[in-house]
Image (spheres, coloured by chain):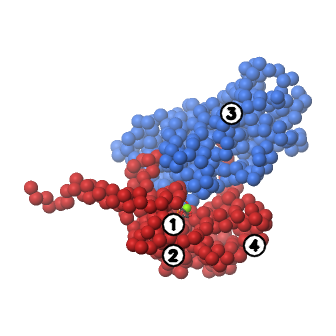
Amino acid sequence: MPVVLGFEGSANKIGVGVVRDGEVLANPRRTYVTPPGTGFLPGATARHHRAVILDLLQEALTEARLTSQDIDCIAYTKGPGMGAPLASVAVVARTVAQLWNKPLIGVNHCIGHIEMGRLITGATSPTVLYVSGGNTQVIAYSEHRYRIFGETIDIAVGNCLDRFARVLKISNDPSPGYNIEQMAKRGKKLVELPYTVKGMDVSFSGILSFIEDAAPRLLAAGECTPEDLCFSLQETVFAMLVEITERAMAHCGSQEALIVGGVGCNVRLQEMMQIMCQERGAQLFATDERFCIDNGAMIAQAGWEMFQAGHRTPLSESGITQRYRTDEVEVTWRD
Amino acid sequence: MAEASPDPALEAEALAAARERSSRFLRGLELVKQGAEARVFRGLFLGRAAVVKHRFPKSYRHPALEARLSRRRTLQEARALLRCRRLGIAAPVVFFVDYAFNCMYMEEIEGALTVRDYIQSTMEAENTPQSLLGLAERVGHVLARMHDGDLIHGDLTTSNMLLKPPLEHLNIVLIDFGLSFISGLPEDKGVDLYVLEKAFLSTHPNTETVFEAFLKSYSNASKKSKPVLKKLDEVRLRGRKRSMVG
Ligand SMILES: Nc1ncnc2c1ncn2[C@@H]1O[C@H](COP(=O)(O)OP(=O)(O)OP(=O)(O)O)[C@@H](O)[C@H]1O
Ligand SMILES: [Mg+2]
């Protein structure tokens, strides 16, 4: 009955989670929120994480009703992500592992999302849409790898949404994506935006530059409201995401779709994906913000799988890496 | 009460009737596959073996976006298939396009196997990609000719290439041109190859040598391959260098 403690801090969220055999015992999280019109910078984000990580650790152990002796393994995010925040969290993971004399495991952040999604939803062999601030990938498992069938050829969908929010000075609290989603519910008019799909790949940079350029003009002329822009952006980029997911499902003959990553808690995206799945007799799996958005439990869960499969990360290899592709990891814990 | 301009109500009625006729016709056909874009049926069209590709409305998309995309793609697909014939690339003959219903009637490639299934069964039987190198070379030739003719496929995968019997002749037929467009830019051709590379290697584990053989054949056969392969490298690098935050 191994208990794994997971540390996540690759972007502006920091979380510490505890998982015991598929059961999430604790999963507290804090978010570094910046003023409207601004994004989070690596140094400031790392300072935020350093300031709260020990409180979070204590909180997680208390909530799980465990002490350090009950922990069997320490998992932490090795990458991908921002260097400074990753490093600030890895230092704590390494220190704790040595203090408590526990094995350490470096986890690929994307794999953490996938394993958490599989655990929470029970999806067995899904086509995965992984959508977040830094990643947009369509993934399916075969022969010991999570293979990337499609991805963005420029910026991630979450990045596109966040930067659009900055143009409109939409609040970053709790997240730009959440506020865009609320505003989009009041939008009515569909503004025509570029729609760029290339097979199972997508591109968002054209949409972003179009809207950055057109938004001030359209708003000043009273041709549409900020709500209409949020609505149009969501309808367009989500249609692209559903389309590439469906293309991968058709190509792989898959009858399950799983959405993971921060953008995945958007209810409109889930709704669109649900309709697509229904129309092809497939099943959709999705989770809510507790598990979609970066959290410690997802790192603990992937760490748990790796621990059971015999993985260990020696101290000499316990660094971080800003770029770490999903398909680099050999998935030894699945058939 | 004579009307000078056509009555919109009557026009809508005529459109609805045409749609009803088409959908009645499709109901009599055999559904072969529900792809990502369309339902593909098999049947007879004026006595010939035909495949009918129907881009039915996707209700997850906003109606305005849906109408724009389905129409554009049906049009692009028909145009590209015609261009293939002009370029001497094997592709199904278009019999008829129903733009009111976004439905395309084309020649059925009888007894065809997708390149995807062919590679998969070869790998299962032989466990080595050795015997696939000839196929890779043929694909290289076909795509070089397509790109030299400034046709970008837009959705290159091994599902969208058919092998026409007899299979050992390795006659490749290209299909599924809904995302295609005309461009002479090396960037567009490079992205086309990049999309294929990812789809190819993720679908067919342990076939890196096959893809290399394809690229080699492409670069030998194409008159304009140099800048295209340079772009391919650039696009790959962009992918690897992209910061991945969040
Ligand atoms: N002309 C044809 N002759 C024989 N079989 C065909 C023909 N056209 C299509 N098919 C079969 O139908 C399948 C789907 O066709 P196509 O790729 O055109 O549809 P799609 O919905 O666009 O697919 P995708 O999922 O790739 O978007 C093909 O993989 C092939 O097996
Ligand atoms: Mg196809």
Determine if marks 2 and 3 fall on one subunit.
Answer: no
Query: Which residue in the structure is indicated by mark 2?
Result: B84
Tell me the quadrant of the picture where the N terminus of chain B can be found. Answer: bottom left
Q: Which chain is blue?
A: A
Q: CA distance from mark 3 to mark 4?
A: 47 Å
A94 shown above or below B158: above
Q: CA distance from mark 1 to mark 4?
A: 28 Å
Query: Which residue in the structure is indicated by mark 4?
Result: B131
Tell me the subunit letter for badge 4.
B
The secondary structure type at the circle numbered 3 is: loop
Q: Amino acid at mark 3?
A: Asn
In front: B68, or B243? B68
Q: Amino acid at mark 1?
A: Phe
Horizontally, residue A231 falls left or right of residue A28, namely: left
x, y percentage for residue A281?
53, 46
Q: Are marks 2 and 1 in contact (CB under 8 Å)?
A: yes
The secondary structure type at the circle numbered 4 is: helix
Q: CA distance from mark 2 to mark 3?
A: 50 Å
Q: Which chain is red?
A: B
